[in-house]
Image (cartoon, rainbow, N blue to C red):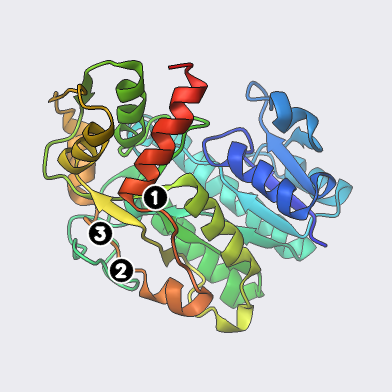
Amino acid sequence: MKNILVIGATGQIGSELTMELRKRYGNEHVVAGYIFGAEPKGELATSGPSGIVNVTDRQSIEVAVKKYEIDTIYNLVALLSVVAESRPAMAWKIGIDGLWNVLEVTREYGCAVFTPSSIGSFGESTPHVKTPQDTVQRPRTMYGVTKVTTELLSDYYHTKYGVDTRAVRFPGIISNVTPPGGGTTDYAVDIYYSAVKGEKFICPVKAGTFMDMMYMPDAMNAAISLMEADPARLKHRNAFNIAAMSFDPELIYATIKKHVPGFEMIYEVDPLKQSIADSWPDSLDDTCAREEWDWEPQYDLESMTVDMLEKLKAKLNK
Ligand code: AKB
């Protein structure tokens, strides 16, 4: 049986992944690591163990690993792309100095570790359509710089020290539970809230801006299946391309409008978000993930939209 530590357990992915891991491995086997000021609440707080784990403080990671005899870490802390541009030093400190601490602890205690990369690890000079697994990675955002470094460090710790590092390049993640904060793809979550609240949606990126996106259940499955995969089959230790759907604002708007006929959208382009989005791939080629650990998403844009609208209506009493 695994003992798992989720670092960043109260964040966008962590809050749902921690609960999913508890369902699969047992509540007592999954520790929710959080920082001061971002304490777990509700079921996340009551259903299993939790403790302060700050990636910038190596000792706090070590204490949790020893106390709970952790063998697997999901390291989910990072500043998202837009916020990282305004706080580059903090993005580096959390994303890379923090990762260094996590990797050193995993090396010492023999843990497996999952640290996500992102479509943000690519840049203008990357082929944008069906972006290959192994290709040019020259991002010009601090978020991208930290994600490429994350991938290189994961590779390094695996080849040099044999640490069981695994990762995926997450696309924009869409969820009806914890909202994202400070990402370029956040609009694809916000648009559903506007539709359900009966508000006009103001879209911050232009029509024709295609990006890869994924529904949270698929994102969680990706992380867990990769961590469960037979290591002998894994050729890539930096991060795998994974893909589920690619759309631009017009396509997601039209899909929602089929279910919410009066829904309206206008554009007010945010130049920073637009320039980041323009530098990212339109769609990823996820063949390696499919071949090396049987990755297969369940949701497309239509089925995700039906589920999102239903869940948000219930959540917002609409
Ligand atoms: C962001 O928009 O910054 C993230 C990502 C795609 O990595 N959602």
For marks 1 and 2, the one nearer the N-term is 1
Residue at position x 72%, y 58% in the image: 72
**Secondary element at image label 2:** loop
> Tag 1: Cα neighbours inside 10 Å, few (<14), some, or many (≥20)?
many
Crowdedness of circle 2 by 10 Å Cα count: few (<14), some, many (20+)? some
Front in this rendered view, residue 193 or 103: 193
Q: Secondary structure at mark 3?
A: loop
Front: mark 1 or 2:
1
Q: Position of residue 295 (x, y in %)?
A: 48, 68
Residue name at image x 42 percent, y 50 percent: 146
- The residue that label 3 is drawn on is 283
92 lies above or below 4: above
How far apart in space, not on screen, are marks 1 and 2 (Cα)?
A: 14 Å
Q: Amino acid at mark 1?
A: Met
Q: Tell which circle, 1 or 3, labels the residue nearer the N-terminal end.
A: 1
What residue would you read off at disc 1? 214
Question: Horizontal and vertical percent for residue 140?
Answer: 25, 49
Q: Nearer the viewer, mark 1 or mark 3?
A: 1
Identify the residue at image location x=35%, y=22%: 196
Foreground: 216 or 181?
216
Provide the residue designation for mark 2.
285
